Amino acid sequence: MTTRRAVITGLGAVAPGGIGVDAYWKQLTDGQSATGPITLFDPSPYRSRIAAEVDFDPVAAGLGPREVRRMDRATQFAVVAAREALGDSGLEPEATPAERTAVALGTAVGCTTRMEQEYVILSDSGRDWLVDPSYAVPELYSQFVPSSMAVELARLARAAGPVSVVSDGCTSGLDAVGHAVDLIQEGSADVVVSGGTDAPIAPITLACFDAIKATSPRNDDAEHASRPFDRTRNGLVLGEGAAVLVVEELEHARRRDAHIYAEVSGFATRCNAYHMTGLRADGIEMAEAIRIALDQSALAADDIDYVNAHGSSTRQNDRHETAAFKRGLGAHARRVPVSSIKSMIGHSLGAIGALELVACALAMEHGVIPPTANLHEPDPECDLDYVPLVAREQPVDSVLSVGSGFGGFQSAVVLARPDRRTP
Amino acid sequence: MTDARAAGTAVVTGIGVAAPTGLGTSAYWAATLAGESGLRPITRFDATRYPVRVGGEVDGFVAEQHVPSRLLPQTDHSTRLALAAGAQALADSGLTADDAPEFGIGIATASSMGGFEFGQRELGHLWALGAQHVSAYQSFAWFYAVNTGQLSIRHGLRGPGATVVSDQAGGLDALGAARRQIRKGTAAVLAGGVDSALCPLGLAGQLSTGELTASDDPSHAYLPFDRAASGHVPGEGGAFLILEDPAFAHARGATIHGEIAGYASTFDLSPDDPDADGLLRAARQALADAGLAPADIDVVFGDAAGRPDADRAEAAALVALFGPGGVPVTAPKSATGRLCAGAGALDVAAALLSLRDGVIPPTVHVREVDPDHQIDLVVGAPRRPADRPRSALVLARGHGGFNTALVVRRPPAIAATPSGSPANPEHANPDGR
Amino acid sequence: MATRELTIDDLTHLLRSAAGEEEGVDLDGDILDTEFATLGYDSLALLETASRLGVEYGVTLTDDDLEVITTPRALLDRVNTRLGRG
């Protein structure tokens, strides 16, 4: 039996600091932070009043008025990113049978923004527990179920194969791409529109992250607030955005002479079964996911040229994943460059894993490793090469990207050249 | 090919149920066979001014009896039901984290709206009282992955974790995801779905689909495939199952309830189009995945939307696959309401119990099956086919175009021969059909 | 908003409501000097408890407070000092 392999043939990104893959990549390689004071609404009641917002005009981004009305901000992001990715893939519409096209979209909090807005209307600003359904918009249900996001992408991509949302908290973006690989390998689809989206910068998200003090209160220096692996970091900075990756069966891509960014050669996820928000310092489960993803890729730890870290700018994460890298990559952990782009674009929950995989694919494409911005004073307990401040030019053939999510999810994805020598 | 197919299967060794017709598998099954209904006027909040006032609530659920005190302040009602059903499934299977290799037990759950009642309450705290009144637990109690995380933590499950969202198709998709994990080497997976959005905001959302019935009479509200079908009733609950690698299950001497033999999911780009073929494609692919022909299927657990057009579409798919009246069809969900992500998992539980006992439960409330559907709907009393049913097809559709089909089979070990003789010809020659 | 002294009974009531009660732990016993961790309360439980203290008693516990408060006695002392009842 021949093994079916999954490769990336199209990229799309809607990110803080840049809409479109080119603008996104320039932002990252310039080491520019896109975090700032929140402008989407008045954040004054909150402890943390900063975020990495997308400068997004849905009409300018190509959406029609009906789409704008129907879709939550996160859905709009996903559709714009998907259009770019499909265009980039060069897939002709209808060239792949709809039955062989699938969707696997990650999101952590779905249509939060619209859900909250509609709630405020139906409940008379929170006064009524018995909300008045007569004020409901016809598409209210779509704002409550994130599956509606996958519906929009399926219609866009004309996908009639397996379609679903993967919602594993902050590993959703990675896990959705992992699910795409499963669908390709098992033969359920030849093309999968995958990725992640979230637009969580809403009052309810700020309030609940305030309550657990997860977000940085560095309101007076918003631009430099996300500082993964830095001794002075004091919490994550919320972000938003979407990334879509067209994942395609290797021979299908080769037959149509598609540009192949990378093979998604390994994916694994493990639960820590420990705590909904907490992480053990040992990183055992993430290390296990890393080892399995390497094994699936037929790669040794030494083969990894770049590690894209979860690097969420919290103390417990930085220590957890530094331990996981040492455990999962052995001595190579001290040699390989590790960086966190959350230092620039914040933490966009279910989108970030997909945005990070786009960055990894571009690192392979261009031979440039994006830096960890705002890293001036490394935490002594985080003693790896985190590529501080400045991007690094260097050939990149194999990449590891990891993520951690509320709920205990620990995921690892490996991207590699499809023509690498395998045993 | 026997080995290849066997390697792709997963066996079910545990069932846990939280349904409007019964909390616990035996209570649920007894009520289902007795044709008891779990539909009543909604009591969880004052629904009198809503256009829909009937629902399927899990009666008599006392959270303190199922959920540790430490978890009560941080869990939505739906998560409490999930914790109860998940614990029950594990207990039924006899499996604990210590019985499997490290990372050997995974978890796959389906959700559609997350911990929605909890979310509505915290939105109220925020907007009516202020940000400082929002619970610290809001950061995860309402999000879609909450049941995956809480069940994983509660039972020490450190294998692969997944949360799938595909509306009402999700319960089956979670089982599909679990089978995929087993195929990739995980020994066992706790899988299924439990949903509940019977709070004012949740009901408002479900109302906006226009798919709910406005009938106030619980016994005449949700009537799938009936001439009088007028929409569905919302319900809460679902089921969790333990899926295992067959070799692992046999090695530890587990009781096998049945086998997840086939699975497929598809999408309809225009689900309201009478020509939409997604459900039929899913069913055909699931049968092919199981290595079965339509004639091998002994009973179908239908999606049973309860809307005339959607019922017509499902009936057409069944007729295309099995011929007019070609297979008994049932929908025990007419007694529970539609459970969103909980529905598929609960239907699989019902299918496994049906195959175990050789009896097909009735579709309660339905009085007059629309003859145009040309389906053999089991109504009134349970049916005991002369030839003991061996294989069931379970169907589910989700709002927006999701379709999933799953095939379950009875284990040969409890086959028709009373002695449980291993010399079951079907099993000895699986390709001889 | 109450400004009376916070008693250990008030605190146990608050803990039960904010974070439940660990199996095998008797909150009605002599717990004043038992570490919160031993009582089964993690940082999330304490954050939720602190949040409810803020709402019900108008006392804000800072990040630094929460770093050093590890027992019910320390929490009561800090809160009552803030309330001017220490």
Image (cartoon, helix red, strand yellow):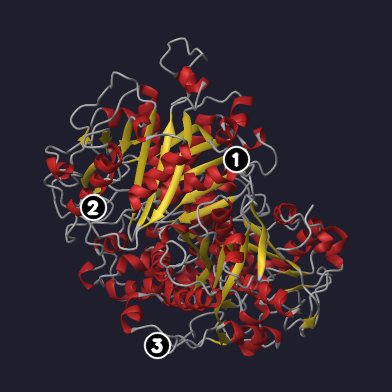
Per the model, the C-alpha gap separating discs 3 and 2 is 35 Å
User: Are dots 3 and 1 in contact, CB under 8 Å?
Assistant: no
Instruction: Tell me the mark number nearer the camera, choosing from 3 and 1.
Output: 3
Which x, y percent locates residue A148? 38, 65
Residue that mark 3 sits on: A59
Q: Does residue B348 appear anywhere in the picture?
A: yes
Per the model, the C-alpha gap separating discs 2 and 1 is 53 Å
Instruction: Tell me the mark number nearer the camera, choosing from 2 and 1.
Output: 2
* SS at badge 3: loop
Which one is nearer the viewer's eye here, A164 or B349? A164
Tell me the subunit letter for badge 1. C
Which x, y percent locates residue C81? 61, 72
Mark 2: amino acid: Ala
Q: Does residue C84 appear anywhere in the picture?
A: no
Mark 3: amino acid: Val
Quadrant in the rendering for residue A412: bottom right
Residue that mark 2 sits on: B310
Q: Is residue B198 above or below residue A229?
A: above
- What residue is drawn where x is 40% and y is 35%? B349
Taking the image as shown, residue A37 lies to the left or right of residue C2, namely right
Residue that mark 1 sits on: C24
Q: Quadrant of the N terminus of chain B?
A: top right
Q: Quadrant of the C terminus of chain B?
A: top left
Query: 10 Å neighbourhood of mark 1: few (<14), some, or many (≥20)?
Result: few
User: Are dots 3 and 2 in contact, CB under 8 Å?
Assistant: no
Which x, y percent locates residue A397? 76, 69
